Image (cartoon, rainbow, N blue to C red):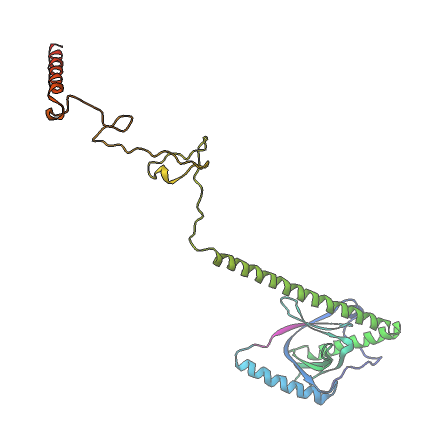
Amino acid sequence: MNRAFSRKKDKTWMHTPEALSKHYIPYNAKFLGSTEVEQPKGTEVVRDAVRKLKFARHIKKSEGQKTPKVELQISIYGVKILDPKTKEVQHNCQLHRISFCADDKTDKRIFTFICKDSESNKHLCYVFDSEKCAEEITLTIGQAFDLAYRKFLESGGKDVETRKQIAGLQKRIQELETENTQLKNKVQDLENQLRITQVHASPAGSVTPKSPSTDIFDMVPFSPISPQSSTPTRNGTQPPPVPSRSTEIKRDLFGAEPFDPFSCGAGDFPPDIQSKLDEMQRQRWRGSKWD
């Protein structure tokens, strides 16, 4: 590895200044990973980092893991590493934090750059595998540095401060979005736990007893299946019991058996009364005969 970005005035760049200043240049590559390095630049530093990440990737490949693909978006503001499908930003390396960039002359697919992490202040070396564009990507990052440096000279350093403020705001927005997502997930978990608690609190198969329906007179309708005596009316009074009806013995209104003097036996009355009954029976028989 022997190429570091430079700011030569006579350098012929590959892209227009507007493409890097107002937009970005996208590239597809495989991401071998990042590792901490002791120095912010140096050929030997990146060579050791590449050797280390290649060995780690070889082990993961033997375990069946594929090297993840990423999309690089290069502009005068930095290098963004995104998921090519979801476009989710995995790493945002601001340009003023990148201290070294190079491609490997022994392996033309490999290129790398060193960037200082904004949170830990550690120098991390990012290593990529691009089959055709390794050298081109390195030159594009160099052109972004050249344009950013010229813009810095023109603005007297104010543009750099503005970019730092914008980067800080973008980072804060991302943190708030992450916090909002975590809060939504927490609320959803609490709602699920509340539903489970309510289900366990109510016994399975329990049915809330319903009050019987009443008619327009506020009385419980008669049901021959269930006796009315077990269900009081709404006003607190108990309905009178329904007398049992017998098909063998007929009773009068007062619940007594009706008297029939002609169906009684002879030994049921005194002799004088029994003689009068016999006479009435004979007269009744004669009357029915002549009829």
Above or below, 288 relative to 173: above
**Quarter occupied by residue 77:** bottom right
Report the quarter where the N terminus lies.
bottom right
Q: Is residue 125 above or below residue 166?
A: below
Relative horizontal placement of residue 237, taking residue 56 as reference (left or right): left
Left or right of 157, for residue 245? left
Q: Residue 134: image x %, image y %?
A: 69, 79
Q: How many marks?
A: 0
Q: Which residue is depicted at the point 43% across and 49% down? A: 207
From the viewer's side, name the closer residue of 221 and 17.
221
- Say which quadrant the C terminus sits in: top left
In this view, the residue in front, 96 or 169, is 169
The quarter holding residue 159 reads bottom right
Residue 279 x/y as whole percent? 11, 15
Asked if one can make out residue 142 in the rendered structure from this viewpoint, the answer is no
Q: Is residue 196 placed above or below 104 in the rendered structure?
A: above
- In this view, the residue in front, 40 or 120, is 120
Q: Does residue 88 appear in this view? A: yes
Using the image as rendered, state which of residue 11 and residue 155 is in the foreground: 155
Find the magenta span and give its range.
Answer: 66-72
In the rendering, at what x and y percent does residue 107 appear? 65, 85
Magenta span contains residue 75:
no
What residue appears at the point 37 percent right and 40 percent down from the top-left corner?
Answer: 230
Residue farthest along the top direction in this orientation = 290
